[in-house]
Image: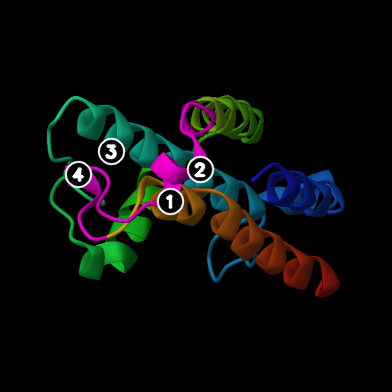
């Protein structure tokens, strides 16, 4: 998680500041929009874990959306966050990253990666959801940002 997060930030910092707000990093999304997307997925993971740890079944991935609706959910996230300021997005992302990391660190490896360990995770594990919302997501973002940088 930490390694991919730092690698992603290195890519972000390699983009000229004025280019971080321009569309094109991921179709119509800017680098800032990608970072806002990651922040919202952090928040969703935190909600899933919080509700799940109290015995409730969280709405996953989000209320009103199924996993098949992920493209529509991502579009809704972009619509909701696209006018947010760059510094605000970065601050939120760094904060939510710290919260996710703190939650993940409370689990030992067995609890984190044993499938069906917790009712709320269904047939998968807390760790699988954490990886999807963090390290693999950061790698996805890093690759998009690198490709965008090469096209500048």
Q: Nearer the viewer, mark 3 or mark 2?
A: 2
Q: Secondary structure at mark 4?
A: helix
Q: Nearer the viewer, mark 3 or mark 4?
A: 4
Tell me, yes or no, if residue 54 can be seen here.
Answer: yes
Q: Are marks 1 and 2 in contact (CB under 8 Å)?
A: yes
Indicate which disc, 3 or 4, sits on the residue closer to the N terminus.
3
Q: Earlier in the sequence, mark 1 or mark 4?
A: 1
The x and y percentages for residue 24 are 63, 67
Q: Residue at x 34, y 40 (%)?
A: 44
Residue 23: tell me if it is visible: no
Q: CA distance from mark 1 to mark 2?
A: 6 Å
Q: CA distance from mark 1 to mark 3?
A: 16 Å
Residue 50 percent location from the top left of the image: 29, 27
Quarter of the image that includes the C terminus: bottom right
Colouring chosen for the image of the structure? rainbow
Q: Which numbered disc covers residue 109?
A: 2
Q: CA distance from mark 4 to mark 2?
A: 18 Å
* Cβ–Cβ under 8 Å for marks 4 and 2: no
Dot 2: within a 10 Å radius of its alpha carbon, few (fewer than 14), some, or many (20 or more) residues?
few
| Residue at mark 1 to residue at mark 4: CA–CA distance | 14 Å
Say which element carries label 3. helix
Name above or below for residue 113 compared with residue 92.
below
| Residue where numbered disc 4 is placed | 120
Label 1 or label 3, whichever comes before in sequence order: 3
What's the magenta region? 103-123
User: Quadrant location of residue 88?
Assistant: top right
Tag shown at residue 48: 3
Name the residue located 54 percent from the left edge and 48 percent from the top edge: 134
């Amino acid at each position: 998680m930490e390694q991919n997060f730092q690698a992603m930030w290195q890519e972000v910092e390699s983009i000229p500041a004025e280019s971080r707000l321009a569309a094109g990093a991921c179709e119509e999304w800017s680098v800032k929009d990608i970072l806002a997307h990651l922040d919202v997925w952090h928040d969703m993971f935190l909600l899933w874990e919080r509700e799940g740890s109290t015995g409730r079944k969280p709405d996953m991935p989000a209320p009103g959306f199924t996993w098949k609706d992920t493209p529509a959910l991502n579009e809704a996230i972009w619509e909701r966050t696209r006018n947010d300021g760059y510094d605000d997005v970065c601050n939120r992302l760094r904060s939510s990253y710290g919260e996710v990391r703190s939650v993940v660190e409370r689990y030992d490896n067995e609890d984190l990666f044993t499938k069906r360990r917790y009712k709320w995770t269904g047939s998968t594990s807390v760790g699988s959801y954490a990886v999807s919302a963090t390290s693999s997501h950061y790698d996805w973002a890093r690759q998009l940002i690198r490709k965008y940088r090469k096209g500048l």
